[in-house]
């Protein structure tokens, strides 16, 4: 099978060959005089002034092709179109930095020449073969020639896509036709008008009207650019107003990611946060790599020669740097990348990375807008983090990091309300370290604190994520088990007791320090109807059922348990 690059060269060669073959047939016409040069310049400007509305592209360059045939002749028009396309493609391709810029330029010139001479040849053949002077016949021939030009032009492009992306030729052919056809519908009336004016009023009047049109299009493009800028600035303003009142880090990140959609184009986006010396992905879209969420970057770490999150970075031709894909920084099909850090007072908070499947998408404008967004996001994320830490200090025990007494009581009340509303049950385990004062007296309070911190770690590892663990006071701990009945809570507490008994929780010299615990269990609503009563019964089960029966035991509250001794 022919490669797509060979196909590009082949179309280019056929196009130029066809141009030279047609010169003797149609004659040289008017070439390279002042009138011709001015018209060529206007055609080039018209081709560069493409309007993008949704997924459709509009320009009126075909108006110049159509009218040039009647003003200058067939060969001069073909040569004019070739020069115009060559100049425009050189400008566009090198501006966008395509890898196959030369092949694309050659293909586009050849593609237009083949389409042009195919349509013109059929037009003149039909006109000579079936001579009929009626205006309707002339309009029909011209309309047929325009459709042939349009169809061949798009078919050649679809063949290129089929070879390049290994897909059927007609997979998106009709959709492609629908996107491009409006330009021709707009161009033909303008072309007809230009020809009529040229025949009635001369070249200068025609030139004046076309120049006015180009100016109007240019002004409209400026309007669209200003409108886009206003939309981008509005998105920044709305984001800054919204996130200043939000003190939840995840919500801030969601708003930032949503706002970016109105600032820069992207196919994949990732917001990184700085944690424990690493930048790690927090939220992301467009990444399918299952290992992506394990990615970690050191601030300033170089990947493929690029240093991320030390400054704003734009990278084109991402597909040329395999390391970027290996580390999952950008998806395999990404060609453009932009990265901006979130920094406040020289402190790195995180960063954002956007990628796009198109090459050379990101400009200095996008970098500037993302810097503004990043500065706002950094302040909001820092405030949210500070609020989160302050909140944690208010509800957590300073030594163990577990929830404190106040939070445990509020959580017990919340669990009871939930059970009253939706039904169900939950259990409470109260744990006390056996003879803890002895350890403090023998080894000192520092060792005692170490025992408590390590005990808290064991408790967290041996319960579910939705279970609530807290330090009730001193060496006493509470575990709230939603949806767990008392008998099952006994099994959980027994497992924890066994792990603690066999795990050293401190070390003095060469000696490992082991402890034991006693635990009491009560369940709601079976054993109590209020928070105080539930805690009291778990405490009594622990004291009278475990402590007084030899310690290192787990005991469930029973109605006939002696609460007076």
Image (cartoon, rainbow, N blue to C red):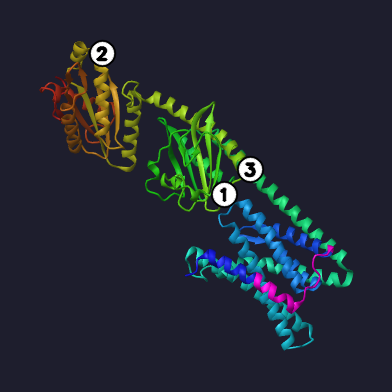
Would residue 175 be visible to someone looking at this image? no
Chain part drawn in magenta: 16-34
Question: How many residues crowd around disc 3 within 10 Å: few (fewer than 14), some, or many (20 or more)?
Answer: few
List the residue tagged with mark 1.
265
Q: Give whichever of discs 1 and 2 has the lower sequence position.
A: 1
List the residue tagged with mark 2.
445
Q: Give whichever of discs 2 and 3 has the lower sequence position.
A: 3
| On screen, residue 277 above or below 191 | above
Relative to 448, 212 lies left or right:
right
Q: Residue at x 65, y 65 (%)?
A: 109
Q: Residue at x 47, y 43 (%)?
A: 270
Q: Residue at x 55, y 53 (%)?
A: 358
List the residue tagged with mark 3.
365
Query: Residue 280 location, x and y as percent?
Result: 42, 37
Counting labels gives: 3
State the residue in front, 497 or 34.
34
Could you tell me which quadrant the C terminus lies in? top left
Helix, strand or loop for the magenta stretch, by majority: helix
Query: Residue 7 location, x and y as percent?
Result: 55, 67
Label 1: element kind: loop
Foreground mark, 1 or 3, reads 3
| On screen, residue 353 above or below 503 | below
Which of the 4 image quarters holds residue 472? top left
The alpha-carbon separation of the residues under discs 1 and 3 comes to 12 Å
Which of the 4 image quarters holds residue 120? bottom right
The alpha-carbon separation of the residues under discs 1 and 2 comes to 59 Å
């Amino acid at each position: 099978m022919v490669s797509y690059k060979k196909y590009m060269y082949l179309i280019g060669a056929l196009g130029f060959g066809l141009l030279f073959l047609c010169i003797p047939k149609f004659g040289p016409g008017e070439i390279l005089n002042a009138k011709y040069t001015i018209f060529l310049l206007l055609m080039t400007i018209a081709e560069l002034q493409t309007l993008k509305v949704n997924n459709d592209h509009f320009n009126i360059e075909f108006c110049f092709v159509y009218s040039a045939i009647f003003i200058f002749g067939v060969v001069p028009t073909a040569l004019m179109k070739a020069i115009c396309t060559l100049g425009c493609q050189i400008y566009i391709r090198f501006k966008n930095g395509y890898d196959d810029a030369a092949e694309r330029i050659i293909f586009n010139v050849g593609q237009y020449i083949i389409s042009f001479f195919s349509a013109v040849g059929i037009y003149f053949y039909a006109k000579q073969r079936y001579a009929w002077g009626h205006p309707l016949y002339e309009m029909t021939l011209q309309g047929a020639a325009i459709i042939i030009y349009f169809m061949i032009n798009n078919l050649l492009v679809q063949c290129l896509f089929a070879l390049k992306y290994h897909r059927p030729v007609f997979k998106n052919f009709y959709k492609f036709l629908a996107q491009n056809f409006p330009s021709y519908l707009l161009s033909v009336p303008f072309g007809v008008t230009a020809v009529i004016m040229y025949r009635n009023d001369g070249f200068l009047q025609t030139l004046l009207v076309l120049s006015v049109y180009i100016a109007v299009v240019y002004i409209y493009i400026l309007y669209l650019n200003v409108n886009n800028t206003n939309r981008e600035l509005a998105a920044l303003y709305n984001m800054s107003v919204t996130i200043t009142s939000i003190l939840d880090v995840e919500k801030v990140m969601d708003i930032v990611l949503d706002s970016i959609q109105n600032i820069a184009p992207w196919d994949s986006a990732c917001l990184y946060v700085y944690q424990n010396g690493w930048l790690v992905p927090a939220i992301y879209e467009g990444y399918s790599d299952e290992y992506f969420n394990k990615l970690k970057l050191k601030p300033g770490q170089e990947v493929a020669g690029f240093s991320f999150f030390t400054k704003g970075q734009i990278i084109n031709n991402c597909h040329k740097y395999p390391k970027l894909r290996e580390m999952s920084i950008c998806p395999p099909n990404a060609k453009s990348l932009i990265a901006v850090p979130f920094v406040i007072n020289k402190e790195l908070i995180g960063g954002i990375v956007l990628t796009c499947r198109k090459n050379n998408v990101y400009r200095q404008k996008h970098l500037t807008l993302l810097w503004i967004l990043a500065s706002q996001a950094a302040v909001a994320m820092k405030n949210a983090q500070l609020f989160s830490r302050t909140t944690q200090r208010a509800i957590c025990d300073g030594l163990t990091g577990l929830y404190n007494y106040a939070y445990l009581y509020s959580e017990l009340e919340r669990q009871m309300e939930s059970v009253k509303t939706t039904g169900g049950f939950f259990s409470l385990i109260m744990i006390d370290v056996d003879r803890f004062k002895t350890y403090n007296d023998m080894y000192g309070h520092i060792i005692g604190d170490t025992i408590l911190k390590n005990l808290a770690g064991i408790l967290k590892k041996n319960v579910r994520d939705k279970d609530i663990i807290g330090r009730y006071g001193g060496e006493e701990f509470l575990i709230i088990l939603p949806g767990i009945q008392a008998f099952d809570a006994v099994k959980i507490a027994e497992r924890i007791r066994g792990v603690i008994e066999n795990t050293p929780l401190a070390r003095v010299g060469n000696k490992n320090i082991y402890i034991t615990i006693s635990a009491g269990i009560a369940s709601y609503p079976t054993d109590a109807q209020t928070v105080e009563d539930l805690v009291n019964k778990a405490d009594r089960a622990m004291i009278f059922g475990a402590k007084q029966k030899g310690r290192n035991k787990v005991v469930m509250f029973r109605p006939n348990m002696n609460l007076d001794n």
